[in-house]
Image (cartoon, rainbow, N blue to C red):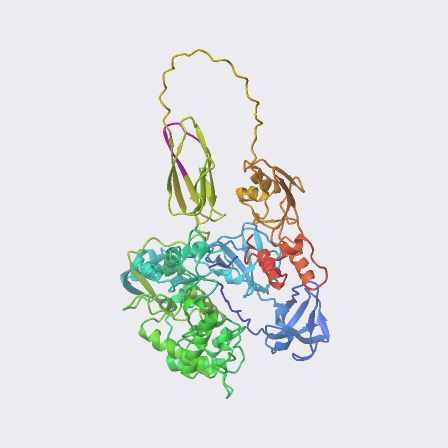
């Protein structure tokens, strides 16, 4: 299951301490290397455990050793006469299986969730995947650690139909499909919700959540604002609502307003306050999706509506420690007197009556789990100053360095000269400026519905922030078994709400033509906003040929080719369909000239003496020279030097040959193979009336030239980087996946992410 529009940070759920004599299985991610066994947690290894062997687990919380590379606690285990300590990353405790129902959670791109036969998640079972809201039987919530290293939670062992396999646990939620909404209790609860002010479209989902978590309280917040009014207000200002596009494949989520996008060049602006090279203004449809509360009525995202007030009954030290695990703050001191980050968040919560879990998720949202420059305390001129919530960290034009400096200027002015002061002081800012003025949920801190200047007093520009932070909050509560606590959720209601807003198509929105030609006469040769054109042809012309080029190659054009002229005036309609489905129509008005009136035959005159016929002049023929680049341009194939790019993975090479031959140019095409998958290294020779040139096919990620992107490809890159075996010829070009002219680990990672369905390589 892929992740687009934002990057989600999910914390590992802790495995509680097991009782003595529990059994476990040795889990080896590489399937060939044994697991080290130490006489103590801090001692060097003196024995090893064989993969897939059984051990007796004596203690799952025996201590930590960060220098060992172990990300969890060490386990004390016994195998035969051997007793020692092994990293908990590699021991799967054999807990009893469950038999509860679960549901595949819907994420932004609604990508399918794949099941795998093994813990390494290398062998897919169901090629089509499980669609969102699919019910599965959960057999084991602690099946083991992810061999790919991409799932931040334990793997779940699930059953779907007659198929059993492993999935990432973060994508499985509680099932609500078996909830009978017609019971007396739930019907009564539904009626009370409606009486409290919730619209009909809110009720079913909230009743289901109530059935799963009876202590949760849903409180309506009637904004008295028109839904479209607030959407347009959020879109009106270029820097208010931004969307991150990390991989460059979310064009459909970006604004196409004139201040944000140029249809002629297909360029989106990133010149927004506090933005950066990957941040763009969101479209109205994207904003509408994230503003519509109904899209987030599930057990995880509901926490964007949680009351952010401090509740010591479930905001515990243990819970804070769990949420900090895996971050730069875990187990670290935050002040010169030895106080820890845990102490800082507890004091912040007590002093300013704000949830410490929310504060932690806010820190991670702003500076990342590994921290950033703004919390390093090492920026020149601002040494020893910290800003954990990025308060004041904005800059015109999205200047990253100035953004950092502005945040540290604010920190220095506040006297935040230790991490402890920055955590507590930032909590004061959030409490006094947001929670205590009515913006007491993550949702309301992003979407200012309080007034008096709506959409103005907003903590964050990232429209996905409440979504991602709700995940972190949920996982914090889940890791400490607090989900059944008495939470209060303040849920906004708007006037004139539409039907539930669907997630927008992420495809590119460009549906413009860059040129249009009728019978080789250009109507325009650069993009224009005009869509209506006229041309006059001779009276004896019975048909015309229409040709065009697109601004964005991924768009499609209908109506091209030869069109018959059956009357004096003919309207030819072209439709350009963008990758996101948006259409733009062009009309060509073709008029045939009237035939001239016949003139009477003149009176005959005597035939003059015949004169000899002149010597015939040779027919010059068609001397128009065609280049190979013209052939490629007309076929819509990308090229650079002697390389061809932009091919769809898995296509037969004959598809490309056919596309070249369809250009109606006098050319000869030959290739290095007659059929099969088009692959890196394939050679295509184009011969025209002026030149002959051979091109080499490049498919980024297909390093070995088999037309596929597999583990063998990133192994070749790895061997190149480690000087085991250098890449040569076309392999070097195909291995440069990020197009920076270098073969580095970043290229290896992109191939690995493609294989693991994290993000696809764009050709």
Nearest to the observer: residue 626 or residue 676: 626
Is residue 448 in view from this perspective? yes
Check residue 570 for magenta coloring.
Answer: yes
Left-right relation of 38 to 652: right
17 relative position to 278: left or right: right
Q: Position of residue 27 (x, y in %)?
A: 65, 65
Q: Residue furthest bottom?
A: 337
Q: Which residue in the rendered view is the most extreme toward the front?
A: 609
Predominant SS of the magenta segment: strand
Residue 663 found in image quarter: top right
Q: Is residue 261 magenta?
A: no
- In the image, residue 660 lies at what x, y percent? 57, 40
Q: Is residue 503 visible?
A: no
Pinpoint residue 120: horizontal percent, then vertical percent: 62, 60
Q: Residue at x 49, y 73 (%)?
A: 323
Q: Is residue 672 left or right of residue 307?
A: right
Q: Position of residue 686 (x, y in %)?
A: 62, 41
Compared to 490, does 679 lie above or below? above
Which region shows up in magenta? 563-573
């Amino acid at each position: 299951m892929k992740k687009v529009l934002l990057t989600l940070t999910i914390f590992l759920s802790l495995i509680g301490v097991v009782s003595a004599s529990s059994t476990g299985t040795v889990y080896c991610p590489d399937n060939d290397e044994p697991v080290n066994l130490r006489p103590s947690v801090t001692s060097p290894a003196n024995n090893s455990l064989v993969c897939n062997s059984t051990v007796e687990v004596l203690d799952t919380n025996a201590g930590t050793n960060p220098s060992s590379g172990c990300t969890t606690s060490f386990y004390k285990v016994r195998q035969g006469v051997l007793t020692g300590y092994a990293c908990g990353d590699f021991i799967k405790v054999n807990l009893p299986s469950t038999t509860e129902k679960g549901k595949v959670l819907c994420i932004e791109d609604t990508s399918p969730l794949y099941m795998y036969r093994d813990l390494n998640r290398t062998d897919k079972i169901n090629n089509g995947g499980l669609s969102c809201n699919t019910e599965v039987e959960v057999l084991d919530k602690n099946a083991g650690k992810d061999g790919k290293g991409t799932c931040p939670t334990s793997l779940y062992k699930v059953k779907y139909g007659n198929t059993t396999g492993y999935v990432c646990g973060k994508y499985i939620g509680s099932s609500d499909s078996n909830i009978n909404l017609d019971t007396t209790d739930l019907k009564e609860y539904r009626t009370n919700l409606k009486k409290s002010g919730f619209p009909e479209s809110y009720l079913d989902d909230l009743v289901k959540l109530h059935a799963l978590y009876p202590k949760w309280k849903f409180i309506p917040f009637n904004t008295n604002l028109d839904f479209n009014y607030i959407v347009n207000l959020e879109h009106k200002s270029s820097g208010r609502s931004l969307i991150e596009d990390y991989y460059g494949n979310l064009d459909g989520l970006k604004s196409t307003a004139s201040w944000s996008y140029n249809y002629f060049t297909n360029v989106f602006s990133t010149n927004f306050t506090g933005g950066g090279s990957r941040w763009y203004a969101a479209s109205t449809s994207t904003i509408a999706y994230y503003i519509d509360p109904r899209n987030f009525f599930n057990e995880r995202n509901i926490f964007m509506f949680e009351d952010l007030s401090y509740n010591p009954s479930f905001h515990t030290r243990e819970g804070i420690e769990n949420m900090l695990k895996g971050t730069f703050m875990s187990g670290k001191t935050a002040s010169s007197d030895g106080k820890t980050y845990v102490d800082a968040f507890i004091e912040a919560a007590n002093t300013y009556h704000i949830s410490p879990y929310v504060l932690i998720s806010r820190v991670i949202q702003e500076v990342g789990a590994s921290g950033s420059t703004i919390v390093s305390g090492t920026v020149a001129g601002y040494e020893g100053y910290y800003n954990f919530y990025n308060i004041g960290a904005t800059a015109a034009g999205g200047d990253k360095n100035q953004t950092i400096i502005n945040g540290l200027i604010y920190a220095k002015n506040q006297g935040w000269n230790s991490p402890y002061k920055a955590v507590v002081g930032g909590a004061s800012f959030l409490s006094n400026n947001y929670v205590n003025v009515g913006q007491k949920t993550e949702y309301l801190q992003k979407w200012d519905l309080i007034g008096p200047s709506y959409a103005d007093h907003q903590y964050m520009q990232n429209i996905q922030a409440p979504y991602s932070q709700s995940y972190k909050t949920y996982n914090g509560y889940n890791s400490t078994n607090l989900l059944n606590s008495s939470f209060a959720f303040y849920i906004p209601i708007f006037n004139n709400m539409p039907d539930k807003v669907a997630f927008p198509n992420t495809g590119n929105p460009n549906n413009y033509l860059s040129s249009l030609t009728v019978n080789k006469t250009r109507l325009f040769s650069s993009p224009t906003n005009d869509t209506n054109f006229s041309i006059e042809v001779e009276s004896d012309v019975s048909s015309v040929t229409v040709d065009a080029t697109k601004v964005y190659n991924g768009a499609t054009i209908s109506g091209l080719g030869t069109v018959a002229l059956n009357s004096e005036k003919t309207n030819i309609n072209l439709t350009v369909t963008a990758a996101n489905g948006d259409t733009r129509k062009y009309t060509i008005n073709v008029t045939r000239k009237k035939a001239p009136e016949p003139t009477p035959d003149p009176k005959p005159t005597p035939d003059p003496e015949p004169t000899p016929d002149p010597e015939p002049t040779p027919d010059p023929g068609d001397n128009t020279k065609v280049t190979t680049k013209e052939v490629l341009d007309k076929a819509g194939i990308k090229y650079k030097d002697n390389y061809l790019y932009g091919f769809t993975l898995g296509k037969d090479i004959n598809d490309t040959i056919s596309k070249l031959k369809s250009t109606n140019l006098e050319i000869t095409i030959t290739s290095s193979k007659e059929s099969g998958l088009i692959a890196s290294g394939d050679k295509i020779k184009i011969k025209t009336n002026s030149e002959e040139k051979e091109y080499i096919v490049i498919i980024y990620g297909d390093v070995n030239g088999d037309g596929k992107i597999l583990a063998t490809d990133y192994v070749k890159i790895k061997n190149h980087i480690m000087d085991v075996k250098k890449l040569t010829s076309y392999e070097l070009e195909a291995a440069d996946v990020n197009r920076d002219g270098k073969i580095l680990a970043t290229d290896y990672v992109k191939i690995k992410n493609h294989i693991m369905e994290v993000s696809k390589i764009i050709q």
